[in-house]
Amino acid sequence: MPPWAGLPLQATLPILDLGTLANPEQASPLDAESLGRLPAAVRKSEEGGRLQLAAIIESSDDAIISKTLDGIITSWNPGAERMFGYLAQEMIGKPMLILFPHDRVNEEQEILTRIRRGERMEHFETARVKKDGRRIDVSVTISPIKDSHGRIVGASKIARDISEQKRSEQQLLDTVREMRDIRAALDEHSIVAITDAAGRITYVNDKFCSISKYSREELLGKDHRIINSKHHSKEFFRNLWGTIGMGGVWHGEIKNRAKDGSYYWVATTIFPRLNPAGAPVQYISIRTDITQRKADEAELQRFAADLAEKNKELETIVYTVSHDLRSPLVNVQGFGKQLNRACAKIQAAVAAGHDGQVPAVDLKAPVEVAIPQALRFINAGVNKMEMLLNGLLRYSRLGRIAFTIQPLDMNELISEIIAAMRFQIDDAKAEVHVAPLPPCLGDRAQTSQAFANLLDNAIKYRDAARALRIKVGGNVTGGMAVYTVSDNGIGIAPSHQEKAFEIFHRLNPDTGNGEGLGLTIAQRVLEREGGKIWIESQEGVGSTFFVALPAGAAPV
Amino acid sequence: MSAAPVILIVEDDEGHAILVRDVLETAGLNNNIRHFRDGQAVLDFLFGDGSKPVNHQGRTYVVLLDIRLPKVDGIEVLRRIKSDGEFRKLPVIMLTTTDDAREVDRCHQLGCSVYIQKPVDYEKFTEAVRRLGLFIMLLLIPPLDGP
């Protein structure tokens, strides 16, 4: 038999409205003796009901306790034993106050006062102390117990340990607070937007508004096309949507356009939130402004290209010094020695001559052949070195000239060149035809030099067998103005064409007096202007030089 | 033993060609010497310029080849000679002013026989070419087959 089995059940079960059995003193104890006095059928049903109630009370996890109006405990179920750690025999007859923590002892007076007034307190949350001194959170429902005359004689109390629930609530609160702080930190650092599954913006933070220069009202409900810069391909966005649409996280760098037309770059992470079926319901995008980094990268690339060009220039110069400059030196030294030898021969002849009479035959070879030849090569060598040094200086100075890139009226520029070369053109009996030319962007003086060089070459390498005809034309393709300078001169064999732009390379050293630098410099100039030059030529038919420069509006 | 090889000097600098020829002759070589002023000229001589058939049957040549040449440079001439079934037998001596390690390496890769830098100093130049002449005299070169 459980220790509480003899106690009045109704006292612990006020909600069952067993009012007549409410008073523990007056209520007949449901023992075998009183049961025996009842008619058998009633007794049986009475007994069944009581046993059922007893089982409910015994098995309840809630503490079910009754007390007198003075706060003395009169019943104590196993739930109470488990919850508070006291056995029923330890507690029955003791004041309820034992369970009250120090800071809540006043509660008992209040409770008893209200009970006397017949009030019921439902789900009153408070704290109590266990036998081992630990404090627990409880939710208590306290009801008055009345006797058969309706007098309040005590109180029933059902207590539920809500410590766990309280902890969960606290944890939930902590989590919510943590999430709020994390979000605040995120908002402090990043550009954040949330869209629905269709990509419509449902949330933007302040940073998003500030970088895009759109107000929140302008953004909500729109999709991200509002800030599309058109920098990226359709393929780029197809890939993005393909990834996040399948529930994947997308990382990448995007160039966007703000409301005022300015552009900004963001490093972007798009995180899809999925429903239980795995389909995206929201997309959270977190972005970082990398506009400055992008600008720095571009700057760095420019520096690297610049450096590469300087390196190439240096290599060219070193190679040239190691080969081209040495070559004439060999002649100067070699033919210098030949001069010495010729002198020695003359001296020997003079020494051998009697009375100042030197035989002409001994002088003939040195004076007529050796000395003039030696002097010719020494002079040529010195001239060549001077020319090479000048050329090298011109070439290397080109890297330091500041270019002023501006719109160029090429019709005007070419006719100026032709006017300046009029004498040469007439002298060569050349015919020059210039078609209307599109404008471009370039440095005026340097571009003019490059084209003058092409015309000069056309005249220099004309075919003596036919009258020279030069044609200058141009059109715009793919943002570049492409000009052609064609001639019907001697042409360049395909195998020699790539050499044409090499420094100090001369295809025909016997023709004219060039230094082998014109095309090299023209190529450097055009590359620095963001253009290029190439050649199409057929030996014996003629050459066409192509010059591509960034297309530009005609200058005003 | 076959006749002394014809020395093909491929050299755009006429002065160098004269100096080399002088030294070789002074060293006692009496080989025939032919001078070509650019890479195309020597290629035309060897492979023909298409105007008439060429026949080198029974001939032997030594090629003295400069690198920096008009029209076709020495590297290309070397490549053409060494990739030809017949002409690859010919000793090719690179005789050039540059000592650029990459150039030296490239020429050896392409199969040049010897790489000599032209010394700027005349005494050294003379000595180098003289020894080269003596070296050429010692070469045993298989004669070329006909076309």
Image: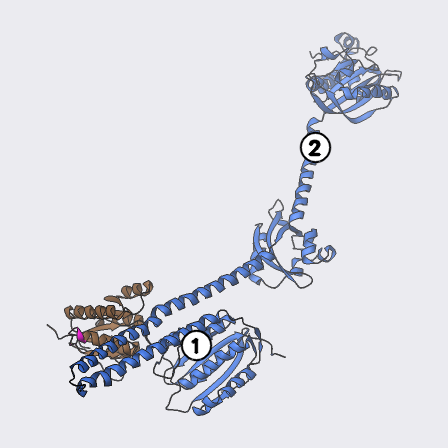
Chain colours: A blue, B brown
Q: Tag count in the figure?
A: 2
For numbered disc 2, what is the local secondary structure? helix
Query: Mark 2 sits on what residue?
Result: A170
Q: Is residue A242 above or below residue A64?
A: below
Residue type highlighted by circle 1: Leu
Q: Which residue is farthest top?
A: A33
- Mostly what secondary structure, the magenta segment? loop
Query: Mark 1 sits on what residue?
Result: A519
**Nearest to the observer: residue A105 or residue A434:** A434
Chain letter behind tag 1: A
Residue A132: which quarter of the image? top right
Q: Relative to A419, is B85 on the left or the right? A: left
For numbered disc 1, what is the local secondary structure? helix
**Nearest to the observer: residue A45 or residue B51:** B51
Give me the residue at 69% from left, 63% from top: A260
Q: Which residue is farthest left?
A: B1
Residue A188 in view in this figure: yes
Q: Relative to A525, is A495 on the left or the right? A: left
Q: Position of residue B31 (x, y in %)?
A: 16, 76
> Cα distance, mark 1 to mark 2?
81 Å
Q: Assign the C terminus of chain B to one quadrant of the image.
A: bottom left
Q: Is residue A438 magenta?
A: no
Chain letter behind tag 2: A
Q: Is residue B20 above or below residue A233?
A: below
**Quick one: label 1 or label 2, which is nearer the N terminus?**
2
> What's drawn in magenta, residue-wise?
B25-31
Q: Position of residue A427 (x, y in %)?
A: 44, 91
Residue type highlighted by circle 2: Gln
